[in-house]
Amino acid sequence: MVEKFNQQRDLFESERSFRLLVEGVADYALYMLDPNGIITSWNIGGERIKGYPPEEILGQHFSRFYTETDRANGKPARALGIARDKGRYEEEGWRVRKDGTFFWASVVIDPIYEDGRLIGFAKITRDITERRNAQLKLEAMQKQLAESQKFDALGQLTGGVAHDFNNLLMIISGSLHILKKGAADDPRLERAISAIDTATKRGAALTNQLLTFARRQSVNPQAIDFTERVAAIREVLDAGVGSSVRLAFEIHSETWPIKADVSELETALLNLVINARDAMPDGGTVTIGARNVVLNEAPLNGDFVAIHVRDTGLGIPSDVLDKIFEPFFTTKPIGKGTGLGLSQVHGFAHQAGGTVKVASELGKGTTFTIILPRGTDVPSREVPEAAFRGSGTVLLVEDNPDVALVSIGLLEQLGYRVRRVADAEAALREIESDGVDFVFSDIVMPGKMDGLSLAHHLRQIRPGLPILLATGYSEVAAGVRGDFPILRKPYEIHELSEAIAKLPR
C-alpha cells in the first residue's frame, strides 16, 4: 500500500514538474489541442510569441494563428490530418499574432494517443523571423557578390579587347583625315571614305559602351544642370522615340545639379529612350523625370538625384529582368540591337558613384531609375572655337608607333611642332631640355610610370606646364576625377583642337 502511494506521489510530482517546465518555457509556444484542433493548454511562450493570455485563447481553435489565405485553403485541418496519418507534421510559414502582425514560424505537430485512441495533438511553435531575415540577407549578399564577380570578369575581358580595338580605330580615323584631302575630285573615293568614317564612328560607339559597362572608361565628371542638358539634346531624344511615341517630362524645378560625365549621361538617356520606344510597338508615352533624394543606405549616402525614364509598354518578364544589364543580352531580333545599351547604362551609373534600378509590370510598362550623386558649381557654357589653331612645341608621349604617327599628323595640322617619346622616363628627360609648351600623353604605357603618374610628377616639377591625357582604356583613369583633362581614343582633329583650347595657359 505504501509502495503504491509512493508511486502515485512520484507520478504526481513528475507530472507537476513537467507541467511547470512546459508552462515556464518562454522561447517556444508549447500547447495541446483536442482532436478537433481546440486549444486545451497554453504556456508562457505562447503568450509571449502570439500575444494571447490563457483566458483569451483556451477553448479557441488553433486556426486563428493562420493567415486568412491559409484558413481559406484549409491548411490548419490539413496539418492535423498529416500529423494524424503520418505521425508528425513539420513546416515553416507565416503565422499571425493577436495584434495582427505576422511572424515566420517553425511548427511541429505530434499526435497524442492513449490506449490506441487519438486524444489530441502536441504543438510546438517557434518564432524564427530574425533567423529567416538573416538567411534572406545572406542569400541576397551572396547573389550580389556572384553578380559582382561575374560583371568584373566580363569587365576585364571587354576592357582588354576594347583597349586594343580603340588603338586600331585611332589609326583608322586619323588616317582618314589624310585620305579626305586627296579624295576631293573622286566621288567614288569620297563615298568609300565616308563609309569607312561611318563604320569607324560606329565601332567607337560600341567600344565606348563596352568600356562603360566594364567601368574602365576614362571619365570627366562635372556638375551638370539636368534640365539644361535635356533641353540641349531634346532633338536627339525626339528622333530616338520616333513619331508614334510621345515624349513627356517630369523634372522638378529645384532639381540639384548632378556630377557625371556629360557624354556618358547623354548616351545613357538615349539608350533608355530607345529601349522604351522598342517596348511600345503600338506607340505610347516615354516620361523623363528627375527629383532630389537623400540616401542613407550604404554604399549610397548623401545627396543624390534620381532620374527616371518610364514607358507605358509591354513590360519585362520576371525571368528576363535579372539579365537585362548583361552585355550582349537582348530580346530584340537579330540586327535590331547589340545588347550593349543597358549594360552601358549600368556601367555609367556605377562608375559615376550611383546605381540604376528597374521596376516593371507586364502590360503596364517599365521604369528605369538612375541615381547619381549631387554636383556643385555648374560650369559656364562657353564653348571654345572648333577651328582653334596653335603654335609652339608639344611633347607627345605615345608607345604605339602607328598611333603616334596619326597623332603627330593631327597635331601638325593644328600648327604644332611635335617631339615624340615612347615612355614616361624618356618624357622626363626631354622636359629637362626645355622648349616644350605642353605635354600630350597616353595613359596606358609600358615601364614603371604610366601617363597619369607622369602627369602628377610633371605638376610637381613644372606646375605651370599644360598637360592633356589620352586613353582608350585605363582603370587608373577612373581616379583622375577632374585633376587632368582626358581625351578619349579614338579622337578626331576637332576634338583634339577643342581639348587643347581648354588647357590652362
Image (spheres, helix red, strand yellow):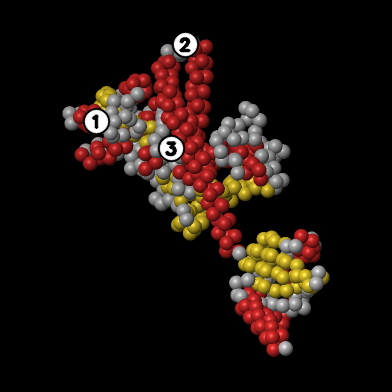
- Relative vertical location of residue 3 with respect to residue 253 in this rendering, above or below: below
- Relative vertical location of residue 496 with respect to residue 41 in this rendering, above or below: above
Q: Is residue 460 visible?
A: yes
- Which amino acid, mark 1? Glu
- Which amino acid, mark 2? Asp
Helix, strand or loop under label 3: loop
- Which amino acid, mark 3? Arg
* Crowdedness near tag 3: few (<14), some (14–19) or many (≥20) residues, C-alpha within 10 Å: many
Residue 335 appears at what percent x and percent y? 62, 27
Residue named by callout 3: 216
Q: Give how far apart the Cα atoms at labels 3 and 2 are.
A: 42 Å
Residue 372 appears at what percent x and percent y? 48, 49
Helix, strand or loop under label 2: loop
Q: Quadrant of the N terminus?
A: bottom right
Query: For the view shown, which residue lies furthest in the left direction?
Result: 433
Q: Which comes sooner in the sequence, label 1 or label 3?
A: 3
Q: Give how far apart the Cα atoms at labels 2 and 1 are.
A: 46 Å
Q: Choose mark 2 or mark 1, whichever is in front.
A: 1
Q: Quadrant of the C terminus?
A: top left
Residue 282 appears at what percent x and percent y? 72, 38
Q: Which comes sooner in the sequence, label 2 or label 1?
A: 2
Residue named by callout 1: 425
Residue 105 appears at what percent x and percent y? 65, 64
Q: How many marks?
A: 3
Residue named by callout 2: 185
